[in-house]
Image (cartoon, rainbow, N blue to C red):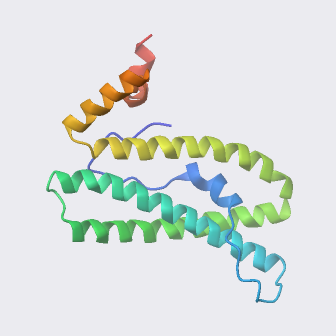
Amino acid sequence: MGRDRNPDRIPRAGYELAPLAGLSSLPLSAAQPSLGSARLLSESTLGAVVVYAIYQALLTALRTEAMVRRCQLDRSSQAKLIGRSVLGSMKDGAAIGLALSLLLLVFPWLSLPLGVLSVVGLGKASLDLFHAFWDGLNDQQKSELHEAAYAAGVNLHRLLQGPAQARFRA
């Protein structure tokens, strides 16, 4: 579960959201006639597309905000970059959502392990979003957050250090 330390690279939504995307569904209107398993597949695939799109939009917006603040990117380029990354992520979400919904249609008991894995995946996704947010802050804002966290009794250094640094520190 390593973190990409390059603040100039736009991360892609990975397999950390796959279990949650497989379990989510977006209900279609009730006015449509019941299509049975086809309706289930389309609702699940649509839910996965929405999950991947929202996560990728947040991740890209937070990461590119740091670039905008450093004047490496303007707002219109930021919006275009967010749109392109979300479209690419939606394609991945559709493929993963369809595959997992087919798998859950055949093996419905897999929803329990996917539920457990989705909690782990959400933890990784939350850390990625936090790091993208952190990279967008300037030094003064980072120092203010460190002081506020220290006053609250929270150690931000453990959260912010990389896995290699965490192994050598006791």
Q: Residue, x 68% and y 62% (percent of image)?
A: 24
Q: In the image shown, does 116 or 141 lie closer to the viewer?
A: 141
Q: Is residue 37 left or right of residue 148?
A: right
Q: Residue, x 64% and y 43% (percent of image)?
A: 119
Q: Residue, x 34% and y 53% (percent of image)?
A: 62
- Which corner quadrant holds the C terminus? top left
Q: In the image shown, does 103 or 51 lie closer to the viewer?
A: 51
Q: State the image coordinates of residue 133 (x, y, percent, origin top left).
A: 35, 46
Q: Is residue 20 left or right of residue 168?
A: right
Q: State the image coordinates of residue 160 (x, y, percent, origin top left).
A: 38, 30
User: Where 32 falls versus 73 (above or below)?
Assistant: below
User: Where 115 falls versus 158 (above or below)?
Assistant: below
Q: State the image coordinates of residue 135 (x, y, percent, origin top left).
A: 29, 43
Residue 76: quadrant of the picture? bottom left
Q: Is residue 126 left or right of residue 103?
A: left
* Residue found farthest to the left: 71
User: Where 48 falls versus 59 (above or below)?
Assistant: below
